[in-house]
Amino acid sequence: MVLSTSPDVQTFLNYLRYEKRYSHHTLISYQNDLIDFFGFLEKRFGSISIKEIDHNMVRSWLAELKNKGLSAKSINRKISSLKSFFKYQLKMGVMETTPMAKVISLKVGKRLPVFVKEEETKKIIEALKSSTDDWKSLNTKMLIAIFYSTGLRLSELINLKEKQVDFARSQLKVLGKGNKERIIPLNKGIMDMIDHYRNLKKKYFEEREERLLVTEKGKKLYPKYAYLLVNRILGEAGSLDKKSPHVLRHTFATHLMNNGADLNAVKELLGHSSLVSTQIYTHNSIEKLKDIHKKAHPKA
């Protein structure tokens, strides 16, 4: 069986491309998974038709992937590709039953979010206070301070407009995923920083950019610019596995939970649509409680 000339596979990929309008990257992933799967079948079972494929053949392929060291997450993605492929074959009447009915996805252990410890966060903020007032330093201060104080996503912060800052109420109006609006309170320190930054924009740039944060040329920030500034500061802070702006969002949520914040309140501040997404931060809180218990309880 030669995959590149298989009409069933090609028809499926065309369906994904033209009807589902999947991205080029996603199409390549599906194609690679199917090439790998059908290559395995031909090598192990010889030339067989699609109707002859059963769940044991699929499981044999998955076992081989596991032996090669593929992660559960990667294997589950390949399972998903096969499920979509065979579901389409059912829809088109090529098959009467799917071999995926008895194939179960692997359990994936949840990774705890990477965050900066409270004492390290304080050191970062103190170090930034004494930095110079060139625009890159100003932007670095603003990015770190706002990310940590609000838990905003990168896209939310770089697209934040001045008019979204309510100076009278000391709060921020954010438009998140799915155009869902949320209100985030701001402390006096952040309000003063924003006001100072806004006044500098008026002083140095004739054309006013409606976005709050701007580059040295007065233009709106772009993702890579913001990412690199945050990455550098977090890199200097210690040995974090990740050094992206999202680490500061995780830090915001984790510190709130560790200091007794209500889970529903954290959910609203982060703009999560479900508590399931927010519950991951309770794991860090539980770990902290275990540590306190171990150090303080005489029978621990």
Image: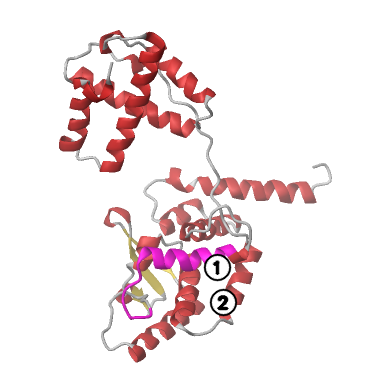
Majority SS type along the magenta span: helix
Type of amino acid under label 1 = Ile
* Foreground label between 1 and 2: 1
Q: Is residue 215 above or below residue 184?
A: below
**Colour mode of the rendering:** secondary structure
In the rendered image, which quarter contains the C terminus? Answer: top right
Residue 148, position in %: x, y? 50, 65
| Residue identified by numbered label 2 | 128
Please identify the quarter of the rendering in which residue 131 is found: bottom right
Point out the stretch of residues depicted in magenta. 216-235
In the rendered image, which quarter contains the N terminus? Answer: top left
**Residue at image x 28%, y 79%?**
209
Badge 1 or badge 2: first in the primary sequence? 2
Type of amino acid under label 2 = Leu
Residue 227, position in %: x, y? 44, 63
- Residue closest to the eye, 96 or 279: 96
- Residue closest to the eye, 252 or 237: 237
**Element on which disc 1 rests:** helix
Q: Is residue 151 magenta?
A: no
Q: Is residue 62 above or below residue 120?
A: above
| Residue identified by numbered label 1 | 233
Does the CB distance between marks 1 and 2 fall below 8 Å? Answer: yes
**Residue at image x 35%, y 18%?**
100
Q: Which mark is residue 267?
A: none
Please identify the quarter of the rendering in which residue 95 is found: top left
**Residue at image x 60%, y 66%?**
236
Residue 29, position in %: x, y? 33, 35
